Image (cartoon, helix red, strand yellow):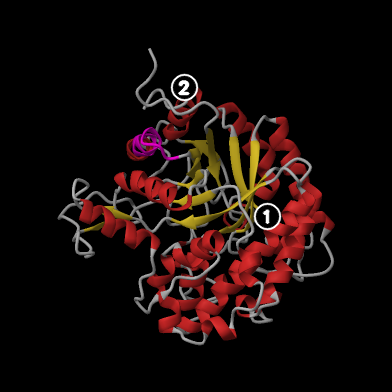
């Protein structure tokens, strides 16, 4: 009998990582400093004084990791390219040793039957470009496009799936407004909006660069899903209020306003910024946006990618509903909001009409190797079961969701929280770098084998 939760034929199952969180080898083979390398050297910036200098040592141990993926039956692997490993100066000369690492890795993945999805920017800006004002500098758009062209020229004969940016909401909101992520800046709202425009322009130019190299490329972005969840899904007013929170700007004045998708989705898909921008910053469009910018930014893409962990429950009047006492929370303190997966997919499908990919979904849990040598992470299995059922519900209701990637393949460096949080399907001992598959990996292997049939 067909399963109630069987996913569509051809649905892509995968796991995701980011270069600065797993690779290590931070100064080997010609790699330059990233803003995160520098940020982590500043006392008090990162939990426990942790750094990504060694991380999971994926740079050296990737063949064994890929073999583990193959044994688990993982069909797809999302990875990022470290810009300062490929171009230590940010522009100009290529570090052939750095690019050769990714060349070998891609070959290894393909030989194992694993489809690579590449993210070009997952937060590790070359420090030398930050010293040239980073994303506040309009020239960044051209530098990023040049970098994208070099990477795709080398790898595009084998890699067809490309993500320009991961979560600009976070590296701008947390890194440039709140100052709690690299590069640790606390810019004005207007200045962060300027940076956001340059990121958008960089995305658009990179789309052109990728298409020029890879004619059959599939391209998009991975955004934070800052989702409004209807407090009463049977109340049309609550549904519309949640949709508004999901898709339109919130002028909070702090870093949280940059968590919305509007600053990226609207210029990418509609060729404009939200109307309220002109009222709040009357000179923005004439001083920051140049003729032709929106035409570049809105070059057609192939999918809308989003990362979902939790949302906010919204009443019909637009207010956020207070969490009930004892609401389930992950080890990171994030709430369990499985139903938000349904509403994210539904709202994005209705708004943009593009194929959807969930590029990150998972939780930090209290994982350790038990006395029997296992990592029995039963709460991760429960968490993922709930979220995947909601994703399936969205598909059943018409959302065109093409794939889902677990965050993360392995425990890794969790940015300002160092090695405190464990998101992986594979446990990593950061002293020995020993890998131990968690029970959730065996469970997910069966989900993949049965295409969701065991949910």
Quick one: quadrant of the N terminus?
Answer: top left
Q: Nearer the viewer, residue 42 or 360?
A: 360
- Residue at the image point whose x is 57% and y is 73% from the top: 197
In this view, the residue farthest toward the left is: 325
- The region drawn magenta spans 389-399
Q: Nearer the viewer, residue 149 or 85?
A: 149
- Residue at the image point whose x is 47% and y is 26% from the top: 451
Q: Position of residue 209 (x, y in %)?
A: 74, 58
Residue occupied by mark 1: 81
Is residue 290 left or right of 328 when viewed as pictured?
Answer: right
Residue occupied by mark 2: 450
- Residue at the image point whose x is 59% and y is 67% from the top: 200
Q: Badge 1, how many Cα within 10 Å: few under 14, some, many 20+? A: many
Is residue 188 visible from the viewing direction of this image? Answer: yes
**Dominant secondary structure (helix, strand or loop) of the stretch shown in magenta:** helix
**Tag 2 and tag 1, C-beta contact below 8 Å:** no
């Amino acid at each position: 009998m067909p399963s109630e939760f069987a996913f569509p034929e051809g649905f892509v199952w995968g796991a995701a990582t980011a270069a600065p969180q797993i690779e290590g080898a931070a100064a080997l083979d010609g790699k330059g400093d990233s803003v995160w390398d520098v940020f982590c050297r500043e006392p008090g910036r990162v939990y426990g004084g942790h750094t990504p200098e060694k991380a999971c040592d994926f740079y050296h141990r990737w063949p064994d990791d890929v073999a583990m993926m193959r044994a688990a039956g993982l069909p797809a692997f999302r990875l990022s390219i470290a810009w300062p490993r490929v171009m230590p100066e940010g522009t100009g000369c290529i570090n052939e040793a750095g690019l050769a690492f990714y060349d070998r890795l891609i070959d290894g993945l393909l030989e194992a039957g694993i489809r690579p999805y590449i993210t070009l920017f997952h937060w590790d800006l070359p420090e030398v470009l930050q010293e040239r004002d980073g994303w506040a500098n309009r020239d960044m758009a051209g530098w990023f496009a040049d970098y994208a062209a070099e990477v795709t020229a080398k790898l595009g004969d084998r890699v067809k799936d490309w993500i320009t940016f991961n979560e600009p909401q976070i590296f701008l909101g947390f890194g440039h407004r709140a100052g709690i992520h690299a590069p640790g800046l606390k810019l004005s709202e207007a200045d962060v909006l300027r940076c956001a425009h340059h990121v958008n322009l960089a995305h658009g130019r990179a789309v052109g660069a990728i298409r020029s190299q890879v004619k059959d490329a599939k391209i998009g972005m991975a955004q934070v899903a800052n989702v409004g969840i209807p407090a009463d899904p049977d109340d049309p007013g609550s549904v519309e209020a949640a949709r508004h929170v999901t898709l339109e700007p919130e002028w909070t004045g702090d870093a949280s306003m940059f968590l919305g998708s509007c600053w990226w989705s609207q210029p990418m898909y509609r060729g404009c910024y939200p109307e309220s921008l002109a009222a709040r910053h009357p000179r923005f469009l004439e001083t920051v946006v140049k003729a032709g910018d929106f035409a570049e930014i809105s070059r057609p893409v192939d999918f809308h990618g989003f990362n979902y962990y939790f949302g906010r429950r919204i009443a019909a009047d637009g207010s956020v509903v207070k969490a009930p006492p004892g609401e389930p929370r992950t080890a990171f303190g994030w709430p369990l909001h499985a139903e938000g997966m349904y509403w994210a997919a539904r709202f994005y499908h209705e708004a943009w009409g593009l194929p959807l990919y969930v590029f990150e979904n998972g939780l930090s849990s209290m994982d350790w190797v038990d006395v029997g040598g296992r990592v029995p992470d039963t709460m991760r299995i429960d968490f993922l079961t709930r979220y995947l059922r909601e994703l399936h519900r969205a598909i059943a209701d018409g959302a065109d969701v093409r794939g889902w990637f677990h965050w993360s393949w392995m425990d890794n460096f969790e940015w300002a929280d160092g090695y405190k949080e464990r998101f992986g399907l594979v446990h990593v001992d950061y002293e020995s770098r020993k890998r131990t598959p968690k029970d959730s990996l065996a469970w997910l292997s069966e989900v993949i084998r049965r295409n969701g049939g065991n949910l």
